[in-house]
Image (cartoon, rainbow, N blue to C red):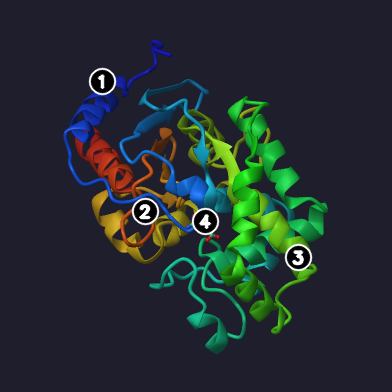
Amino acid sequence: TTTSSATFLPVLERIAEEIDHTPGRGRPADYIPALAARDPRSFGMAVAEPDGTVYGVGDWREPFSAQSITKVFTLALDLAREGDELWEHVGREPSGNPFNSLVQLEYENGIPRNPFINAGALVVTDRLQTRTGDAAGELLDFLRAESGNPALDCDTEVAASEAAHGDRNAALAHFMASYGNIDNDIPVLLDQYFRQCSIAASCADLALATGFLARHGIRADGSRLLSRSQAKQVNAIMLTCGTYDAAGDFAYRVGLPGKSGVGGGIIAVVPGRCTLCVWSPGLDEHGNSVAGVAALDRFTTLTGLSVF
Ligand code: GLN
């Protein structure tokens, strides 16, 4: 879709061309077969303007596994409901450890470092589940409304695979429950979390769904989800924690709030200006898309946009 306000389309075209000639794409996540089967040469990138205009290049309309990108939306949905009480149950500091790490939980009394590592996301989903009775359904409703794509859904094969290989997430949930930091029955929570991870969406869908963070908390229909201050807070946590133990390097290279997932997607926010989503399945050792980080790095370099 090329429209008159597709300001950054020439930049996206140039980046896609450069990425196409860049060797070394990393390797797709291989902990479940559905992710391992994706072609590492796939590449898509979309920009959404605050008015809902969206455009992109490459595989920007192709659905992929959103995975940990969904952690941003559950955080926003829970913050909107319970506000600062959430921060008694999850911290806001970068972890410096891999996304599925257990180590800090014991000496921090079952309070995870931040909402974007798996432990923290399990706490957020648990709290959203308590408040809504269907955290994954609430998330789907939100993503469908914001993206304007009613077909957006969970991938049941991926969700089943997540459950079959879910020992580590189960261990995180049980361990936090031993400190009283989990409300729901563990099987209920894990089912909600695995469905959340399995949501399939395209770069176009996710760039649009992230729009509320560029609009300082305002949803696509003009209603307010987060206060201006809360939107700033979510963006800040994305900047400091959104790419796990590579968040420092991501801030250095890209200079934007961003959130990655092991499906190879990354969303990013230019507050007040636009949102982006890039997808390429090959990952680096931290679980971030190699071509995705490179493309965002080029975007902020070529446009001069960043939060700095
Ligand atoms: N489903 C993955 C997990 O829980 C999500 C992790 C990620 O995208 N970083 O391990």
Q: Disc 1 marks which residue? A: 10
Labels 4 and 1 touching (C-beta < 8 A): no
Q: How many marks?
A: 4
Q: Quadrant of the N terminus?
A: top left
Amino acid type, callout 2: Asn
- The quadrant in which residue 274 appears is top left
Q: Disc 2 marks which residue? A: 288
Q: Secondary structure at mark 3?
A: helix
First in sequence: mark 3 vs mark 1: 1
Q: Secondary structure at mark 2?
A: loop
Amino acid type, callout 1: Pro
Amino acid type, callout 3: Pro
Give me the C-alpha separation between circle 3 and circle 1: 48 Å
Give me the C-alpha separation between circle 2 and circle 4: 22 Å
Give me the C-alpha separation between circle 1 and circle 2: 25 Å
Q: Disc 3 marks which residue? A: 187
Work out whether residue 229 can be spotted: no
- Residue 81 lies, in percent from the top left, at 73, 53
- Residue 300 lies, in percent from the top left, at 26, 40
Camera-nearest label, 4 or 3:
3
Amino acid type, callout 4: Gln
